[in-house]
Amino acid sequence: MTATQTAAPKPHTETGPQHGAGAAYTTLVIDRDGPVATVRLNRPDALNAMNRAFFAELPAAFRALGADTSVRAIVLVGEGRHFTAGLDLKDTSNVIGDRDGDAGRVRERFLRHVKYLQASISAVEECPVPVIAAVHGACIGGGVDLVSACDIRLATTDAFFSIKEIDIGIVADIGTFPRILRLLPDGIVKELAYTGRKFPAGEAAARGFVNHVHETRDAVVAHARDIAADIAAKTPLAIAGIKNVLNYQRDHSVRDGLDYVAVWNSAMLMGEDLMKAATATMTKTSVDFADRLPDAD
Amino acid sequence: MTATQTAAPKPHTETGPQHGAGAAYTTLVIDRDGPVATVRLNRPDALNAMNRAFFAELPAAFRALGADTSVRAIVLVGEGRHFTAGLDLKDTSNVIGDRDGDAGRVRERFLRHVKYLQASISAVEECPVPVIAAVHGACIGGGVDLVSACDIRLATTDAFFSIKEIDIGIVADIGTFPRILRLLPDGIVKELAYTGRKFPAGEAAARGFVNHVHETRDAVVAHARDIAADIAAKTPLAIAGIKNVLNYQRDHSVRDGLDYVAVWNSAMLMGEDLMKAATATMTKTSVDFADRLPDAD
Amino acid sequence: MTATQTAAPKPHTETGPQHGAGAAYTTLVIDRDGPVATVRLNRPDALNAMNRAFFAELPAAFRALGADTSVRAIVLVGEGRHFTAGLDLKDTSNVIGDRDGDAGRVRERFLRHVKYLQASISAVEECPVPVIAAVHGACIGGGVDLVSACDIRLATTDAFFSIKEIDIGIVADIGTFPRILRLLPDGIVKELAYTGRKFPAGEAAARGFVNHVHETRDAVVAHARDIAADIAAKTPLAIAGIKNVLNYQRDHSVRDGLDYVAVWNSAMLMGEDLMKAATATMTKTSVDFADRLPDAD
Amino acid sequence: MTATQTAAPKPHTETGPQHGAGAAYTTLVIDRDGPVATVRLNRPDALNAMNRAFFAELPAAFRALGADTSVRAIVLVGEGRHFTAGLDLKDTSNVIGDRDGDAGRVRERFLRHVKYLQASISAVEECPVPVIAAVHGACIGGGVDLVSACDIRLATTDAFFSIKEIDIGIVADIGTFPRILRLLPDGIVKELAYTGRKFPAGEAAARGFVNHVHETRDAVVAHARDIAADIAAKTPLAIAGIKNVLNYQRDHSVRDGLDYVAVWNSAMLMGEDLMKAATATMTKTSVDFADRLPDAD
Amino acid sequence: MTATQTAAPKPHTETGPQHGAGAAYTTLVIDRDGPVATVRLNRPDALNAMNRAFFAELPAAFRALGADTSVRAIVLVGEGRHFTAGLDLKDTSNVIGDRDGDAGRVRERFLRHVKYLQASISAVEECPVPVIAAVHGACIGGGVDLVSACDIRLATTDAFFSIKEIDIGIVADIGTFPRILRLLPDGIVKELAYTGRKFPAGEAAARGFVNHVHETRDAVVAHARDIAADIAAKTPLAIAGIKNVLNYQRDHSVRDGLDYVAVWNSAMLMGEDLMKAATATMTKTSVDFADRLPDAD
Amino acid sequence: MTATQTAAPKPHTETGPQHGAGAAYTTLVIDRDGPVATVRLNRPDALNAMNRAFFAELPAAFRALGADTSVRAIVLVGEGRHFTAGLDLKDTSNVIGDRDGDAGRVRERFLRHVKYLQASISAVEECPVPVIAAVHGACIGGGVDLVSACDIRLATTDAFFSIKEIDIGIVADIGTFPRILRLLPDGIVKELAYTGRKFPAGEAAARGFVNHVHETRDAVVAHARDIAADIAAKTPLAIAGIKNVLNYQRDHSVRDGLDYVAVWNSAMLMGEDLMKAATATMTKTSVDFADRLPDAD
């Protein structure tokens, strides 16, 4: 889950809102407030439906943010009335691609396409920096795949989630099931997946899928940014370590987890942060931790 | 978890209540309401205690229902005052079988017997169709194994669960532990298993073991049937896929899960359902999905 | 998870409060009330901070209690105002040891040190007897590792937990992450680990990390002892089996779990307990189960 | 891999060559020589090609032999010029079944069919008694799946194996790959699978896929029977244990394997065999071990 | 292991030897002979040592070849006197990168660098087309990582392999150990890794690490091309399936493998190849299978 | 597999042959030749049968050698006519312990005993330093468990191995099966385990269980010492790393292995060894690597 770091040598990095130029995204806008970046789903007229461009831009954006070591936490929000309506069905190749040709070959190509969509969503999880989703309104289908790949989810009282894939006759396949089973009990997931029913934010919070609920979108975004700012003030080395180690742990035994975290800390500790942090804790002063190092040229 | 499909070539299928004849069950009654089947534990005088006949009939019934592709969802209920009192201790061979003979050989035979009981319970999980347990009154010991193998659990306010095996001096061994750890936090399971204390429906619902609670048995059964009817209206191909994929996912890593669901959909998509479903969604009309195909002769 | 049983041939066993002598612990006090032992963190002036002596004494104590087959359940409490402040930072070698010497060799030695600390905490999990933590006040950093290795957690209303390691710049590495992911949803763990924020007992109980909450420390300890006494009245053979099997299950698939528990019961059943327990259940009388056997000389 | 033991309550058992009657197999003949059974592929005119009847009879035969506790070892041979030509392509439904109907549904039914064929082959592995394949002539396609599910393989000098599936355009799917990777290095398997080339017995023996090679079919069968007789003279409890434990180990870590075998022996040892065997070893006399116990009524 | 298919939308594809232009590689030359591509390590003056450019070009080349569906098999050879001398130590950033900066941060950056190198080597394994290494002379250090990621290895009599990393004081970390343990027994690997001794082609062939040995480089390359041509004549759909399924199987249990291959074939079979292949087999004529489909636009 | 490092704070270390005193072993003798230690099984009159004392002394010796960081490699040999006759049956509690008492409790105690014996053998594997077994004559039963836990096996031409446990009616349970399946193909292991037949050194070498064979015991021991001396001249940090990483890899997927080794090297590299080794390699001079650091006080 750390493959991110192996991304192409020098991805371009976003350090502010897009203006003109070729580098700009058509489905996203990225803001920076010091070490905190905000990624906005920005096709409000289309209810932020996930089209072809989106699946290409999402990983590009998160790889760029991950490679920019001055970014320490990311907030993910949706513009307009809803977080996202999910896959853009008008852009049908999103769902099944072209059916023409030999049945076996068409399906093999389709497999590659699904893996391409999965990889797009996984880029959020592989980003070394924590990602906090701030959800309002509807978060449907592919949107659940997307927020399940985030580290933390916050939502407005009137937000809801829906594993809607069943209503277009498919098994959700770009990331919901593997991750949501770590967030909700088996029986709850099955009801949601079989029926596609709305899972309101309040219920989701009671079940632990959502961390906090607030009345308004503004309050949710503000809370998400507070958490992001809190994270950004910690040493980015340990934050990246926690994300890496917890993602490893999720899929491994207790014993494997103990071995892995021990080796991890043997590598990453004993730099300057520990002393800085200990001093700050004892003297109750604040510290300024350096960014992680960028890739070598 | 899909071994069901390899069941003997032509198991008999139940399409209505049992009347006379050799095929009838002594511990179960099966009703059909269109695509929804209801399986009733039907020894109310014995509090639906699980005897030798039950362990033979349960898998026979679920394999038959699974093989009857006109069945799309199953509700499991108990007749009488309680859902089930668990293993029928009067039928002691249920628990340990005959102790006579060489100690090593007796234990090896006992192992086969436990695996036989486990396989009986697992038939519920292996059934390709979702199973919804509607629990009222007591659900004790083996009953917890049974409902843990269902997909969704509903209960009356006064229902309770009890991992009672500790009080007869054994470790629950026919299916509770492997499945309940995906439904409840470790520490809760341990308290319930060490003490055998009653776990009331309300607490179970708060923890996510039970999906919904209602005052009366009628209301619980009605809700279970509503969910079943809702499921039955979806494409049975995707429903079977969700059950298969979620059961796979439960025991595999995120990465394995992504790979598996991608291949799954490469196989099962691109039939007629996707287009039907998409059209229906867009036109807000209802659809009639065809049943899965029966096994070839 | 059963390595305990392989402990050195004849560890000394504690059967009452320590008085004088070399065997006494400097950081712990152990009481016995029949089959229930209480282990007290006993450096109240230092807020029960975990120092070098603690990490040596903790496994010694739990191995001794595990080897004393008259012990059937253990309650873990903290003396003074708080459960524990976590790692004793004054005893800095606890955290990183000596940095002098070749960088590679220092880190390899550090790895051994972390594994030593991990093994100390794991002794609680490896103890064949259930351990119930009764937490009041603060339970910080290493304290979360410690209580996560217990079977059941109870807490006072004003207690709180904090994965505080991030504030000294490290990834919690002596046991929190592998175990807490089985106790809390992924997204909740991440928020707690990234921010180090206080996780109050009430919230922890709602999420299932804590089983029960009471107003006062006395009430919490009393409830912990009631559960312990309840456990102590059951057959210790089945109790040890449940702990072993659940710890196995936590890291294995459903199918593996079914196989393992079947073989386990083939070994451990068919002794005297089953008949005793069955008789008692039917006659509604109480039973006196014998202790497990001590290791052979 | 021990699911065998859960087979239907009372499968019929074969205790001699088939004569007339409904119980007789059309593709197999079973002989008994005391505790050693010989299963013969018996369609020499069709080169023992695996047709529909074969896939039904194979598991029936091995379940029956496994349930007959007087059987202690099984030799598998082919009648006629070759061991087997593999799947009977004339019986095309073996390979893909009927293609008519909705594309998604046809493929879901096909999946069930493949699992049915897999389960047929797996019955050999699940049989609690060791199975020794004695191969002569060609062993092609499905034949490799079949012998890979045996415990031990012997072959004539002129025998050869071929993962021929590639030449009918499919990925071998009824049992070769999962098992052969435990018998041959990765790179050898890939060459055989990509090219379908003949893998002669001599090369197979050098690589460890085949245990022993002899000039003639008679010599191979004689050696297989010697090994079978040797196995039959050991305690059947330990033999069944070895097969169970090694099949478990194949798919688990060293640590899991140590845990599992320890619990296994805790169950199965301490009967009469150990003392009998020890006495015999010390006095250099022979012993007569009792059969395993049959399932209870 | 199939991530290849998710590669960036439109990687450039190589369809012949490089001439001039920006697309040309500095460390590789790629030839095409119909469906068979040959990748040459082409820095003979530097003994094909693996420098920075190599680690960028290798994955670019294999992703391009994998995306060009007219490529059906790949042969990997080295130009000059040796296959490769391994990591280019003159290009020291290959090994450890820059050491300047905070110790923790330098190590975290180093981790990213190792993962980048690993991903470079893994591109060979992720290529959907089989890769056959034809080795002559020395294959040292990183060269063993490289050929271990190939599907099949052939070598000249005088070729040798050496896990030389120990002699520069490191643990081989870019791909040797995970893959070579599937190719050689544990004890052999340990001797080679602890001592770095030469492992001659003859011994490697006897152990199964190398499939075939020939006297001359020409004979080895010719044999590699024959195998490649043989593979290229099969249906590319099944060949890609075999590679995918065997790579999955390598890391999964028997049961998982059976499930996965069954779903795989449910997807990929029932196209035109099966009928073509069956007809060809029966009529003993040759077939012309179509290429896999390229990614959709 | 690295639990060694967690051994009790200050185990005594052996630095030469035992003379008098309480520390001396009754079943082992330990010699030192610079960084190479030789452990001798030293009960030749009893054919080095493994008795109670042996199982206590073996782990004590290997933990001491592992803690003495001046030890860099270990050779394991047997005194007298044979390497070892396996478990000492006269010391019957080795095998099953006392049978008196409640059947369930006796078996639970037996389980602890088997785990104690397993832990004794595992101490060889957990020792951070490579262990080379030099086997002559018979290596029977428990002896196979013992040498399977070593890193490398050498043997005399007339040596043989025998998984003799079947002849005393038990499943080998203290370490053979988990480890030997990584050293030999499945089918070979099964024949050896079912029949207990002698597995001569020559055959074992052809199969890769034994690395090298020589005519005489002297030649075998000399070769073992040469390998040990070779290992002892390398950097002990990388040697310990290779052992740790390969033992991890054995039980993990390719992807897990890549992740683990990357983190491992991030920790352990960038000390003085790399520069020393690189310089030595380039200047073709020899190097003197420092020992690993001992545990802190």
Image (cartoon, coloured by chain):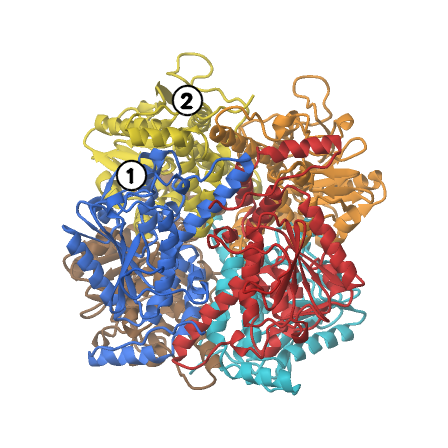
Chain colours: A blue, B yellow, C brown, D orange, E red, F cyan
Residue designated by label 2: B70
How many neighbours does mark 2 have within 10 angstroms: few (below 14), some (14-19), or many (20 or more)? many
Could you say where residue B295 lies in the image, as x and y percent from the top left? 52, 25
Residue designated by label 1: B161
In the image shown, does A108 or D3 lie closer to the viewer? A108
When the figure is inspected, residue E176 is found, relative to residue A215, above or below; the finding is below
Camera-nearest label, 1 or 2:
2
Could you say where residue A77 lies in the image, as x and y percent from the top left? 25, 54
In the image shown, does C288 or C220 lie closer to the viewer? C220
Residue at image position (40%, 81%) is: E101
Residue at image position (65%, 58%) is: E183
Label 1: chain letter: B
Quadrant of res B59: top left
- Which residue lies most toward the front here? E20
The amino acid type found where label 1 is placed reads Phe
Quadrant of res C89: bottom left
When the figure is inspected, residue D98 is found, relative to residue E215, above or below; the finding is above
The amino acid type found where label 2 is placed reads Ser
First along the sequence among labels 1 and 2 = 2
Label 2: chain letter: B
Residue F90 in view (yes/no)? no
Could you say where residue C58 lies in the image, as x and y percent from the top left? 35, 69
In the image shown, does A48 or C229 lie closer to the viewer? A48
In the image shown, does E141 or B66 lie closer to the viewer? E141
For the residues labelled 1 and 2, the Cα–Cα distance comes to 32 Å
